[in-house]
Amino acid sequence: MSEHQTSSRPIAPREASRDGARAIGDIRQWLGTSGGVFGMSGRLRRTFLYSFAAIAVIVGVVNIINVETDLHALPQYGLAGPAVWEGSSWLTLLLFLWIPWTAWRMAPPLGRPRWKLSLHIPAALAFSFAHVVGFVAVRKLIYWLLGAHYEFGAFFAHFRYEFGKDALGYLLFIGTFALIEHLLRQQTLVKTPGQTLSFDIKDGARLTRVRLDELLAIASAGNYAEFVLRDGRRLLMRSPLTALETELSPRGFLRTHRSWIVNAKHVTALKPEGSGDYSIELGNLSVPLSRRFPAALARLKAPAA
């Protein structure tokens, strides 16, 4: 039957505690929830808000079109039925939009390692399941308040159908997050005189602001990333290298190795090491370029690089 059918339907040591709090802070920073309005800061907050608004409008327009379609296909339900069905779907979809957002922050499409992209499979399933359970609950509540009964039918049979639509929506949402973040980054570059942007290196409560043109490379150092500066300083920041790659790749930085990111502007030489690997020289600093990163090699060999 159609889903629209109705019927009459011991205390830890202080150091350990500090490390635990810091670890939580690292996770929040990775997900983009390190403070500010709605638990996010800076460009990430604007990315989420603009994406949320765009998705709300686009999905809302689709729902309105569906209401018009249902009015012609199922005139016996009048306007109230389609309005409740589509409105509940729109509301719960926005309510659970945090699921694809979190998955995007943890596994961006262009991030590494690539195996992290598999996270989107359970995330898409969880998003669709929450969406379906949510709109069914809302519909049942509204129908109950109106003295009627809403019957969804066989759950898993209908869920397979809904998941097909939700999976497509999930991919579009991930694309929306990435597109809006990219546009905001480009806007920042355009507004910055000479495009000499700075970057904040945070280690606990300590913050060091450096100019990007002073940054040679970034190396993975366990749970930390080590920033190598032109003046010889090496600063640590607790962050995964993948998050820094996502942040800095639009600003001229390249991932050349699973443990290294370099500022392409400061590359002075490329030396073949055999088997397709290279050694990159940035002044007195030597950094590996793995054959697993052919795009980085192509960009460094290009005249523009």
Image: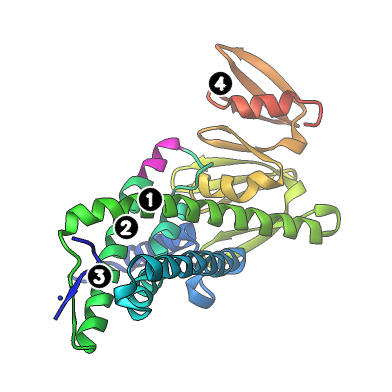
* Mark 4 vs mark 2, CA separation in Å: 39 Å
The residue that mark 1 highlights is: 167
Q: Main secondary structure of the magenta part?
A: helix
Q: Is residue 77 left or right of residue 171?
A: left
Q: Earlier in the sequence, mark 3 or mark 1?
A: 3
User: Which of labels 2 and 3 is toward the front?
Assistant: 3
Query: How far apart are the two marked residues, 2 and 1, measured between alpha carbons?
Result: 7 Å
Q: Earlier in the sequence, mark 4 or mark 2?
A: 2
The residue singled out by tag 4 in the image is 291
Q: Nearer the viewer, residue 84 or 250?
A: 84
Q: Is residue 83 left or right of residue 148?
A: right
Query: What separation in Å lies between label 3 and label 1 (alpha carbons)?
Result: 18 Å
Give the mark nearer the N terminus: 4 vs 1: 1
Among the two numbered marks 2 and 3 on one chain, the one whose residue lies closer to the N terminus: 2
Q: Quadrant of the N terminus?
A: bottom left
Q: Amino acid at mark 1?
A: Ala
Circle nearer the N terminus (2, 1): 2
Residue contact at pointers 4 and 1, CB within 8 angstroms: no
Q: Residue at x 68, y 24 (%)?
A: 298
Residue 84, image x, y percentages: 34, 77
Q: Quadrant of residue 181?
A: bottom right
Q: Amino acid at mark 2?
A: Ser
- For mark 2, what is the residue? 128
